[in-house]
Image (tube, rainbow, N blue to C red):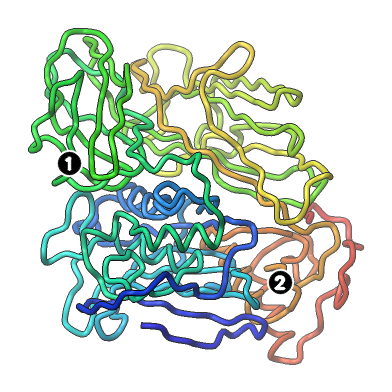
Amino acid sequence: MNRLIRALSRPHRVVMLALTLATAGLVWSWVPTGDTWPTGSASFRINTNFPVGEVGSAQDQIDLIRCAASAWRTQGQTNFQFFYLGTTTSTAASPFDSVDSVLYSAASGGGSTLAVTSSAFIGSTSTGFDITFFGQDDFGDIVWNGAGDTTASQADILGVGVHEFGHALGLGHPPIAGATMFEFYSGLPDRTLHPDDIAGVQDLYGANLSISDQPEINDVTPPTGDIAGGFEIVIDGDNFTWDSNTTLRVDGVIVSSGLVACDSMCRIRILSMPAHAAGPVSIRITNELGDSTIDDAFTYTGAPPIGAATISILGGGGSPGASGVEVETVIDSDFDFSAYSFGVTFDPAEVAFEEATVDGTDADGADFVAVNFDNVEGWWTLGVALDIVPPIVDFIPSGLDRVAAITDYAISSSMSVGDFISLNAVGGVGDPPIAAVVSNPSGTSITPALQGGLIIVQAGGAFVRGDGNGDGAIDIADPIFNLDYLFSGGSSFCADSQDTNDDGAIDIADPIYNLAFLFSSGPPPPAPYPGAGSDPTADGLGC
């Protein structure tokens, strides 16, 4: 089902592509929407507002949706990539508001609609998208599954998510019943891309056969466990499928199918590890996509596991030659932690490290903070201990998006607007080398999962006051952009352009000033307006 609506901002159009429940089938080939991302990538945020009882915790929701997005790059073996920028509280499906989000609505999408992708574009260039999963249709409640295989009465958040991200990158509905992008929901096959889906995404963005389309094990959490067994481990990776066609082996011995839970295409759990002698063991996975073995994937010891944690670098933006480009690093942990360390690598030809601090973060006031960097080799490291005087009483409570560091970078003047700069969270870099570690107050530590981020190179310097979203026009989208930044954790590309009243601060007065100018014959924004220029007023903002 395709629906066309008109956006409020005149240069944009919005296409809404919906996935529906039905049975039908024709045979042809993949269908483009006509709009693609010129940079070969798109970023998004997630509102973790699904009903927890149906799809799991907030972290489960993030994992499932991020996994659905990654399927196009891994199984599709393509150059295109979706980047996750963190959570959002936005509940508005407005693809022109510069907050590309995935969210849940308890309302009905009409008919038998399960989910809808709203895509904004100018000409053939994609500029934004939002994905909404619905809680009802005209026939009653939609029950979304979380981790694991679906039942006959559930809709698969993963399969539907893969379908909707396909729309976001530029694929429409082909008349092939087995394809993930087929208009009608077919359940299990949607997690595994059909050859028609792969042909479509590779035709739009090119093939990259160096990317493995086989099952891949990237991380095992916790990496160690007691020799007595009986505890759960989580295996993160790519190209996992279903409980029914997945076989896991620990040190060559098949794990009972009743103890294996394939939560998603990116996560499998062994619910109860077998007892084993101390030492490292291999883990092997086999499914319909292939076979993969990781030697020394897990080590049996006498120490019990303490939980799982992820260190993630969120996104940032700045103009060529800009300094003070701020990027946050966050930790998601299911246990209280009192110390952590990690490293970050980058291309020194693209960006330079300026400063990393814990001031204003969840670790503000830590007893020990150590920062080291090398802008020639392209790395920086951080070690933090909240409390170094026993007994250890200070800690950061478990949860999502615990801010661990705020880093400033300087973008090289050789970079071009539209470029992406990769920031890689790693362990084992630095002088001396620093391990990636998260430790609880008792001194037991784990190796966390690591998630990199990126800096988007944007137009800067010259700006038009009031054009907060930087699309070259002052319209209703700009005060909406400011309100999202102020109250929903939205992004900011040029602070000076958002300071509509030129008082040196971004606050509620700015969108009010903008709305008065647009609709109530209020005064125009101060210079630079209507043409682009530099800020004639000295303040603490920049662009």
Q: Quadrant of the C terminus?
A: bottom right
Please state the total of marks drawn on the protein image.
2
On the image, numbered disc 2 is attached to which residue? 471
Q: Quadrant of the N terminus?
A: bottom left
Q: Which mark is residue 253?
A: none
Q: Quadrant of residue 476?
A: bottom right
Where's residue 195, x and y in %? 36, 58
Q: Which mark is residue 261?
A: 1
Q: Quadrant of residue 186?
A: bottom left
* Residue in the image at 54% along x and 56% along y: 43
Mark 1: secondary structure: strand
Instruction: Check the image and report above or below for 500 versus 46.
Output: below
Q: CA distance from mark 2 to mark 1?
A: 46 Å
* Residue in the image at 35% along x and 37% along y: 237
Looking at the image, tell me whether mark 2 or mark 1 is earlier in sequence order.
Answer: 1
Where's residue 465, x and y in %? 80, 70
Q: Quadrant of residue 424?
A: top right
Q: Residues within 10 Å of mark 2 (few under 14, many from 20)?
A: some
Q: Which residue is at the far right?
A: 536
| Amino acid, disc 2 | Asp
| Amino acid, disc 1 | Ala
Q: Which residue is at the far front?
A: 28
Which residue is at the front of the view, 199 or 467?
199
For the residues bearing labels 2 and 1, Cβ distance under 8 angstroms:
no
